């Protein structure tokens, strides 16, 4: 995740954290510590696997954030 553009990282954290019902800061803290139990408990096994795949692959995360749907969500979150 360290190779990701900081703005893209913040956008991804906002989108994912809102889906998980936690703050972006709490999600980032869990991700950095490697303790994802709190973040993953509300997800289905399929969604959990997708999230882990996206988080471990900066190129994939960047592609996801570049989609029109993600850009629209990020735009709404910034307002």
Image (cartoon, rainbow, N blue to C red):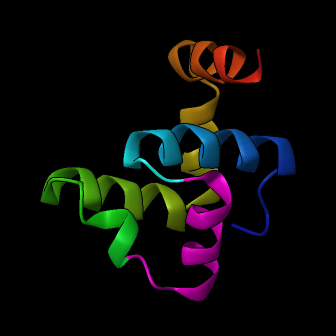
Q: Is residue 52 left or right of residue 24?
A: left
Name the residue furthest left.
Answer: 45
Where residue 75 appears, x then y in whole percent?
A: 71, 15
What is the quadrant of residue 41 in the picture? Answer: bottom left
Label the magenta part by its dominant secondary structure. helix
Instruction: Provide residue 13's location: percent of width, then percent of height.
Output: 62, 49
Q: Quadrant of the C terminus?
A: top right
Q: Examine the structure image and report whether residue 63 is included in the region drawn in magenta.
A: no
Q: Position of residue 52 (x, y in %)?
A: 39, 64
Figure check: 19 above or below 41: above
Q: Which residue lies at the image location 79% right of the left edge and 64% below the top edge?
A: 3
Q: How many marks?
A: 0
Chain part drawn in magenta: 23-36
| 19 lies above or below 66 | below
Q: Quadrant of the N terminus?
A: bottom right
Residue nearest the viewer, comparing 21 with 6: 21
Q: Is residue 44 left or right of residue 49?
A: left
Left or right: residue 69 compared with residue 50: right
Q: Residue at x 32, y 53 (%)?
A: 50
Identify the residue shown where x is 57% and y is 12%.
68
In the rendered image, residue 33 lying in the magenta stretch gets the answer: yes
Give the residue at the far right of this rendering.
6
Residue, x 52% and y 68% (percent of image)? Answer: 56
Q: Give x and y (percent) for residue 69.
A: 51, 15
């Amino acid at each position: 995740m360290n190779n990701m553009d900081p703005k893209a990282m913040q956008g991804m954290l906002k989108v994912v954290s809102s889906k998980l019902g936690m703050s972006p800061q709490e999600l980032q803290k869990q991700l950095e510590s490697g303790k994802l139990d709190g973040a993953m408990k509300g997800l289905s096994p399929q969604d959990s696997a997708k999230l882990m795949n996206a988080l471990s692959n900066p190129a994939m995360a960047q592609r996801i954030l570049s989609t029109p749907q993600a850009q629209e969500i990020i735009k709404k979150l910034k307002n």
